[in-house]
Structure formats: structure tokens, C-alpha cells
């Protein structure tokens, strides 16, 4: 019954994380939300707290509050809070519970919209964070993989450009442009798994709440392009990279490989 349990500040106590050694901010989910358009208490129709998104039941890709009671003999409520805490980790939670997995996949797929255009041998793709009330991705964003997988075919069905494909060893191709944070230690060396050594930020390409990020790709010069062109653009997500799975597998060989999840897809003919 305490008001704090209905307030995003309650979640802040754990979902902003810093390194006790050097005070580097490793996770800033609460701070990101605080600055986002979702933090809008003056306008209750626009305001969405952590609890609205992470503790509301999902059905058919939409928030679908459950009616019921939370204490025996208590009064019927229109929106009983669920405790799935659907976030992004569909994979590890899915190993234990199909409901958690399926709730999480629904939330993930609500996070972004795509738009695609082609102008003078350039593919221009917009990715808008419409559904995450903080950066996309947030949390352990140094280990999440979120990227554009692009295939452009000409009139004969020949692939004239592609980007963001997996290599044969399962790792993401070097040409991909993942939306993520990259941490380095005090000497500027990438921190990799040793995130607590983070002192310098090498890059942060995540998409803030409400922001539309534009990525454009030049189609290599050469032959004239045979129109119509068909662009297939996917926004893909993988809970952590193959090299992390490979490292964990040394201790737990039975760990399955996390799948690549398609969050959104646009197919457009030009
Ligand atoms: C408008 C809906 C919305 C609001 C508000 C929101 N989130 Fe999220 N959250 C999402 C979506 C969608 C994802 C999955 C995409 C991502 O990782 O950003 C997510 C992911 C997460 C994750 C998983 C991060 C990881 O490690 O991959 C955590 C933790 C989280 N949110 C906590 C919070 C907290 C705490 C707040 C409030 C300060 C909050 N969220 C507010 C929608 C929301
Ligand atoms: C006492 C600490 C603590 C509090 C308070 C707390 N959390 Fe968490 N939460 C965690 C930990 C630890 C995890 C698992 C590790 C992770 O994913 O970051 C987690 C996981 C999550 C996830 C799943 C992340 C994923 O990757 O799928 C979501 C969503 C989430 N919390 C939301 C919330 C919300 C919303 C609140 C406030 C109502 C909240 N948490 C309060 C500690 C806390």
C-alpha cells in the first residue's frame, strides 16, 4: 500500500548501476527514463512508468491489463500487476518459462519502427524508438546486439547490396552497425566481459526514447542498377553475441545458442 511501490523511483534503486571503484555509470536505465517523454506526470495520458510497461500483461503484441484480485478476498482490480518483468531477456527466462519468453518477445517487438527509402544509390533507413521508455537497448547494453540486416535485390533477384549478416562462426559481420555502448578500461582498451573496469566510453549508438535514428548505406558504384529494386530490412536482436556464448560454453557446454529475434521487418520495392 506504500506509494513508493507505485513509483518509478522504486525501480531506480537497482536499475541505475555504477562501479564502486571509479563511479562509472554502467547502467542508467532510470536516468534515461527520467529524461524521456514517458516521464510526464503533468499529462497522465502520456505518462508511462516502468511499472506500466514491465508489470502489465501483454497479449497479441499489446498491453492488455488483467482483471482480478491480488489478495484473497480483496476487491477486483482492472489492472492486476503481473510479475513477469518482461524486459529483453527472452532467452534465459525462456529456458525456465514459456510464458516469460512469450511476454518478453511481445514487449521487445513493440520497441521500434522502421522506415526505408532509396535515393541515388543510397539506402536510407530510419529506426524510431517508439516503445522503450529509455534508450534502446538499455540495461546491459554493452552485451546486447541490435542491428539492421539489409538485403537489396535488383530486377533479376540478384543481391546488389547487403549488410548485417552473421559470419559462419555465428559472430556479427564487421560491416554491421549495432546500436550499443562500448566500454573501455582506463587505458582505452575495450573492457569486453570485464565491464567493472569501465572508465572510458568508446561509443554509445543507442537510440533514446522517441528518437528516430537514420542510418544510410551507399550502394557500391559499378553497373547501372536494374530497377525495380527490392529492399528487405530487418531490425534484429540477439540477447548477447556469439563470442559471449562461446566463452560461457567453456564452463556450461550444454548452453544452447540464443536465437536471432526479428523485431521488425520492412520489404519495399523501388
Ligand atoms: C514505454 C514502455 C517502457 C517504459 C516506460 C520502461 N520500459 Fe524498460 N523496456 C521496454 C522495452 C520495449 C524494452 C526492450 C528493449 C530495450 O532493451 O530497451 C525494455 C527493456 C528493459 C530492461 C532490460 C534491459 C536489458 O538488460 O536488456 C530493463 C531492466 C528495463 N527495461 C527496466 C526499466 C525501468 C527500471 C524503467 C523505469 C525507470 C523502464 N524500464 C521503463 C519498455 C519500457
Ligand atoms: C532490489 C533490486 C531491484 C529492484 C528494486 C528492481 N529490480 Fe528489476 N531486476 C533486478 C535484477 C538483479 C534483475 C536481473 C538482472 C538484470 O536483467 O539486470 C532485474 C531484472 C529486471 C527486468 C528484466 C530484464 C531483462 O533483461 O529482461 C525488468 C524488466 C525489471 N527488472 C524491471 C524492474 C521494474 C519495473 C522495477 C520497479 C517496479 C524493478 N525492476 C525493481 C533488480 C531489481
Image: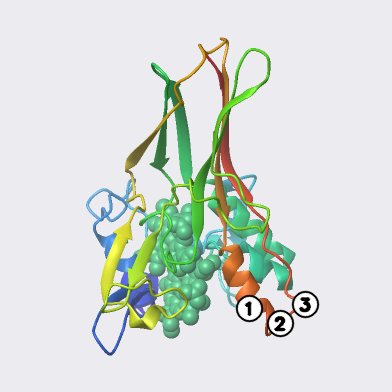
- At 50% from the left edge and 52% from the top edge, which residue is drawn? 146
* Secondary element at image label 2: loop
The answer to whether residue 44 of the structure is visible from this angle is: yes
- At 63% from the left edge and 78% from the top edge, which residue is drawn? 248
Disc number for residue 143: none
Q: Nearer the viewer, residue 243 or 261?
A: 243
Q: On the rendered image, what quadrant is the N terminus found in? A: bottom left
- Residue 268: x percent and y percent? 56, 21
Disc number for residue 252: 2
Neighbourhood count class around disc 3 (C-alpha, 10 Å): few under 14, some 14–19, many 20 upward: few
Q: CA distance from mark 2 to mark 3?
A: 5 Å
- At 46% from the left edge and 26% from the top edge, which residue is drawn? 220
Q: Is residue 144 left or right of residue 245?
A: left
Q: Nearer the viewer, residue 263 or 22?
A: 22
Q: Nearer the viewer, residue 115 or 29?
A: 115
Q: Height in image: 213 above or below 152?
A: below
Neighbourhood count class around disc 1 (C-alpha, 10 Å): few under 14, some 14–19, many 20 upward: few
Q: Are marks 1 and 2 in contact (CB under 8 Å)?
A: yes
Query: Residue reaching furthest front?
Result: 222
The answer to whether residue 1 of the structure is visible from this angle is: no
Q: Is residue 144 left or right of residue 188?
A: right
- Residue 155: x percent and y percent? 63, 12
* Secondary element at image label 3: loop
Disc number for residue 254: 3
Q: Which residue is mark 1?
A: 248
Q: Are marks 2 and 3 in contact (CB under 8 Å)?
A: yes
Amino acid at each position: 500500500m506504500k506509494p513508493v511501490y507505485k513509483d518509478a523511483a522504486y525501480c531506480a534503486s537497482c536499475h541505475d548501476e555504477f562501479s564502486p571503484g571509479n563511479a562509472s555509470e554502467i547502467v542508467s536505465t532510470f536516468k534515461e527514463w527520467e529524461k524521456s517523454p514517458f516521464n510526464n506526470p503533468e499529462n497522465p495520458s502520456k505518462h508511462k512508468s516502468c511499472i506500466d510497461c514491465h508489470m502489465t500483461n501483454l497479449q497479441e503484441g499489446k498491453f492488455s491489463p488483467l482483471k482480478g484480485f491480488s489478495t484473497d478476498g480483496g476487491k477486483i482490480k482492472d489492472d492486476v500487476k503481473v510479475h513477469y518483468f518482461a524486459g529483453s531477456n527472452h532467452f534465459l527466462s525462456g529456458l525456465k518459462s514459456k510464458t516469460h519468453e512469450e511476454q518478453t518477445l511481445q514487449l521487445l517487438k513493440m520497441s521500434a519502427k522502421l522506415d526505408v527509402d532509396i535515393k541515388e544509390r543510397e539506402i536510407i533507413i530510419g529506426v524510431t524508438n517508439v516503445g522503450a521508455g529509455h534508450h534502446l537497448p538499455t540495461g546491459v547494453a554493452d552485451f546486447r546486439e541490435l542491428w539492421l540486416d539489409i538485403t537489396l535485390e535488383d530486377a533479376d533477384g540478384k543481391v546488389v547490396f547487403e549488410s548485417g549478416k552473421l559470419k559462419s562462426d555465428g559472430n556479427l559481420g564487421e560491416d554491421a552497425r549495432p546500436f550499443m555502448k562500448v566500454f573501455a578500461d582506463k587505458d582505452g582498451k575495450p573492457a569486453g566481459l570485464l565491464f567493472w573496469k569501465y572508465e572510458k566510453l568508446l561509443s554509445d549508438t543507442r537510440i533514446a526514447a522517441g528518437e528516430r535514428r537514420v542510418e544510410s548505406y551507399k550502394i557500391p558504384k559499378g553497373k547501372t542498377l536494374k530497377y525495380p529494386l527490392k529492399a528487405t530490412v530487418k531490425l534484429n536482436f540477439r540477447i548477447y553475441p556469439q563470442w559471449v556464448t562461446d566463452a560461457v560454453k567453456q564452463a556450461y557446454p550444454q548452453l544452447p545458442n540464443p536465437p536471432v529475434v526479428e523485431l521488425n521487418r520492412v520489404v519495399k520495392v523501388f
